[in-house]
Amino acid sequence: MQIDYKQAAEIIRSCDDVHILTHQSPDGDTLGSGYALYFALKQLGKRAAVICPDGETKRYAFISEGYTEENFEPKTVIAVDVADPSLLGSVREIYENRVNLCIDHHVSNVMYAEKTLLNGRAAAACEVMYMLFKELGIKTDSNIARCLYTGIATDTGCFKYGNTTADAHRIAAELIGYDIDFARINREMFDIKSRQRIRLEQHILNNMEVFFSERCGVLCITDEFRSELGVADEELDGIAGLPLQIQGMEVAVTLKEKSTGGFKISMRSAGRVNVSAICTKLGGGGHVNAAGCFINESLEEAKKKILDLTGKALGELN
Amino acid sequence: MQIDYKQAAEIIRSCDDVHILTHQSPDGDTLGSGYALYFALKQLGKRAAVICPDGETKRYAFISEGYTEENFEPKTVIAVDVADPSLLGSVREIYENRVNLCIDHHVSNVMYAEKTLLNGRAAAACEVMYMLFKELGIKTDSNIARCLYTGIATDTGCFKYGNTTADAHRIAAELIGYDIDFARINREMFDIKSRQRIRLEQHILNNMEVFFSERCGVLCITDEFRSELGVADEELDGIAGLPLQIQGMEVAVTLKEKSTGGFKISMRSAGRVNVSAICTKLGGGGHVNAAGCFINESLEEAKKKILDLTGKALGELN
């Protein structure tokens, strides 16, 4: 059942012993909204713990500064930025049927939770969280500001993408006043790369396949490619947008071979192509400019399916 | 003489036949504030022309959409984002002693104009311009919004750098409501590169020299290097920040050999080092995180001077 901010605030006020669930392969928005909610619940005098299906990466460790782990049996389960229970990964079985509240901004949310606070116009789950905190009268502090800013900045590519809302800017204007080193956060989220990463990206771009008058770039990350390069999966995070760096590119497709078979597809769009519509047709979902799906077939078959739909969306195929 | 927004508005209201001067090697902020002022003056029924010392690059052509060139003798000269008359380049002799008003945000402004509206806390000259327009009662339209947004976005690295103010975010929140394709602007300003550019950057990074426990990267762009690569000066715009992409780098130094002798130095800082203080000591200036100067000596001498000051600022030299 979909609920509004007032109703969600009521649930938060009356709940206790909360397990907060983030999605697997956690990003800045799911972790930012998860830990922001933790700090807000602490302010309200409640017990809370953040559960990350994959554990956390070093990259985002700064978000949880000030967090204290506690073990307890949850009375309430809240999922943040989790559009589908399949994204709960390793903790899916434990929590899938007992999510009391889901706080999200994905229009593709499948409404698996008992109650869902969904704002599909928000740039980030952290934007929804900010509005909810206002409703609750939560006092913004530097921990909350750091978490919310990180989520909004990462989900908008630092206010660069078309999903950036006026509210995202207005909220950021307030949050950067709370003694957060946003320049450092942004530098670490967007700018800094290891020398190895720089070489890796170069190699990936040099091996990109190009289709439809150079409007679509395809990256195939097979097991063979990975072992050739000697890189772990984690090191390949964030490569999906690489082809869009190149003049004229409108759609980027990344096919990552899964160890259990099949291909995880990530699509990015820089123009008018709605990649969420393409991925939805293949059983996935996401946003207009960033979406994903899974195709359990051979590389050639997976590529063919994606390229057929992409070519049509670009008007290059009938 | 320094004046406030009210006084500057009075000058704008009573002036006519305005030549608007941008600085040489124009960037998004000087062009954005220059053309925004043009559109505002048109709204006030005045004659105006934008004078770019170097002409304009294709990269920023979108800023001036809707501009109509007119030839007339100026009664008023207004410089925007021009901290020093030396930045007037090829038109310096014509205008240097007759700038009636300078609108700027560089604390290093040498106060060469008859009157100067300076807001050193503003992230961009376009932020100052926005405030001035409010004072003037100018109606924001999509032309003005596009110009001001571009200036603020480019001078803050799309709201990424430490110079980003709460006002910059608040103004952006308003401007993106005026039917401007900010995602496309940002993509073109920050993301898109030609394949050639990608290769060029790789080559430059591979030839970077590294000092002070890998905290300082130095790029030497000599005539020899340029002709080896076969690139024009314009193609090397924006390389100054490249070393800061690499983990651990705090200061980036670029030395570009000038055809007339000596080296143009660009410095960028990602940490606490104030590169403006360093460049000021060498006769230049700028911002805490981005500054420049000119050293009329050999490459070795120029490098030595810069590295000596940088090493001290990093605490690596006494």
Image (tube, coloured by chain):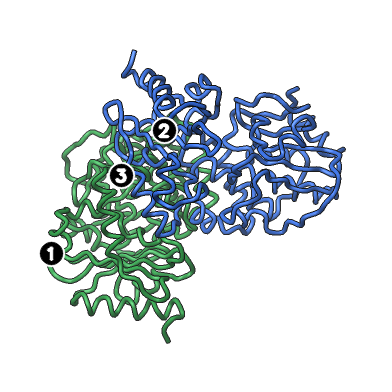
Chain colours: A green, B blue
* Residue located beneath label 3 in the image: B206
Residue A9 in view here: no
Q: How far apart are marks 3 and 1 (CA)?
A: 34 Å
Quadrant of the snapshot with the N terminus of chain A: bottom left
Q: Nearer the viewer, residue B155 or A237?
A: B155
Label 2: which secondary element? strand
Q: Which of marks 3 and 2 is nearer the N terminus?
A: 3
- Whether callout 3 and callout 2 share a subunit is answered yes
Q: Residue at x 35, y 41 (%)?
A: B245
Q: Which residue in the rendered view is the most extreme toward the top? A: B318
State the image quarter where residue B254 is shown.
Answer: top left
- Mark 3 vs mark 1: tell me if same chain: no
Q: Is residue A123 above or below residue A67?
A: below
Image mark 2: chain: B
Q: Which amino acid does label 3 sit on?
A: Asn
Looking at the rendered structure, the secondary structure element under dot 1 is loop
Under mark 2, the amino acid is Val
Query: Is residue A109 visible in the rendered structure shown here?
Result: yes
**Which residue is denoted by mark 2 in the rendering?**
B253
The residue that disc 1 covers is A259
Mark 1 neighbour class, 10 Å CA radius: few under 14, some 14 to 19, many 20 or more: few
Query: What amino acid does circle 1 point to?
Result: Ser
Is the residue marked by circle 3 packed among few (<14), some (14-19), or many (20+) residues within 10 Å? few
User: Do callouts 1 and 2 mark residues in contact (Cβ within 8 Å)?
Assistant: no
Give the chain of mark 1: A
Label 2: few (<14), some or many (≥20) within 10 Å? many
Residue A318 coordinates in the image, percent (x, y): 42, 87
Disc 3: host chain: B
Q: Quadrant of residue B127?
A: top right
